[in-house]
Amino acid sequence: MNRVPLGKVEYNLNNGQVTATAVSWTNDELDNALQGPVLETVLDVEGKNKVLKTLEEAGVDIDGIGNVLLNKIPKDNNWRVGESLAILYLTHHRNCLFPWPSSRDQKTPDASLPGADLVGFQQKDKYIIFAFGEVKTSHENRRPPTVVTGKNGLQEQIHAILSKKKKQEGLIKYLTHHIVENANPDWLSRLKEAWEQYNQKRIAIFGILIRDVTPDIRDLQSSVKELGADWELKTFIEFIAVYLPEKSISLLGAKMANYQ
């Protein structure tokens, strides 16, 4: 799979354990990402092919069920595209690993699932640690946007993961069940090491903001300031803003539907 672009750095912030990085993409960078890795992730091409292969080997007629497994892209489902973009950015540029896309957990097409958007691992220096994250996609021209500082916004959600051990344990439980059910030795090995590091208070938490306005430091400045408390020194907290070309978010779903 091709990598999504790193982007041009627009600003950086640092406040104790909390940092922020903002990057921007050009139109060409966005289009190349949408046609390649983002499309594959939204459609879960890897997962579908794996399931079809297993069914075929078991003698199941895959012609009909193949259509059921195909993920359609609604033209107004821009937040789903934003979430997939965030997963790929962390995978390609922050050494993160996410065992499966959240679409596999949906019982209703295009439903927004409860809990953290991103649950997986990060290779941090010589360690494998748990990586949790929240994603917000916004074309609002407010600084910062409501999805960052409002009720149930990015800042509030990141604080909840940071401060509530029960929430962290719930995410680990979710991850553990899925990995054990898959019985993949690579993922089991990562789970074992991440759990050992978790007991040492070593985890990573990401807040990803997808925007289509001019980059502005105010989008993340207050969040970094508010969350820059005395957290465990081994806890890594990073906000990342990806600024897409202006007024492009409302077109993401439609573009992807055309590429499908």
Image: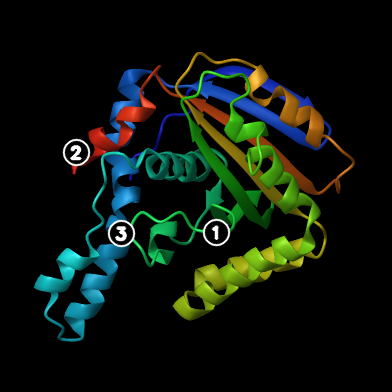
Mark 1 surroundings: few (<14), some (14-19) or many (≥20) residues within 10 A: few
Describe residue 193's horizontal placement relative to residue 26 as left or right.
right
Secondary structure category for the residue under label 3: helix
Q: Earlier in the sequence, mark 2 or mark 1?
A: 1
Q: Which mark is residue 235?
A: none
When asked about the image quadrant of residue 128, the answer is bottom right
How many numbered marks appear?
Answer: 3
Describe residue 162's horizontal placement relative to residue 1 as left or right.
right
- Taking the spot 53% from the left edge, 23% from the top edge, the residue there is 23
Q: Pointer 3: what residue? A: 46
Using the rendered image of the protein, determine whether residue 177 is visible from the camera's viewpoint. yes
- Taking the spot 33% from the left edge, 49% from the top edge, the residue there is 42
Instruction: Note whether 141 is above or below 242 in the view shown.
Output: above
Alpha carbons under labels 1 and 3: distance apart: 24 Å
Amino acid carrying label 2: it is Tyr
Alpha carbons under labels 3 and 2: distance apart: 17 Å
Amino acid carrying label 3: it is Glu
Amino acid carrying label 1: it is Pro
Q: Pointer 2: what residue? A: 259
Q: Which mark is residue 114?
A: 1
Mark 2 surroundings: few (<14), some (14-19) or many (≥20) residues within 10 A: few
- Assess whether mark 2 and mark 3 are in contact (beta carbons under 8 angstroms): no
Q: Earlier in the sequence, mark 3 or mark 2?
A: 3
Q: Nearer the viewer, mark 1 or mark 3?
A: 1
The location of residue 229, given as percent across then percent down, is 87, 38
Secondary structure category for the residue under label 1: loop
Q: Earlier in the sequence, mark 1 or mark 3?
A: 3
Alpha carbons under labels 2 and 1: distance apart: 29 Å
Instruction: Note whether 5 is above or below 132 in the view shown.
Output: above
- Taking the spot 38% from the left edge, 18% from the top edge, the residue there is 26
The location of residue 243, given as percent across then percent down, is 48, 23
Image quarter (top left, top right, bottom left or bottom right) of the C terminus: top left
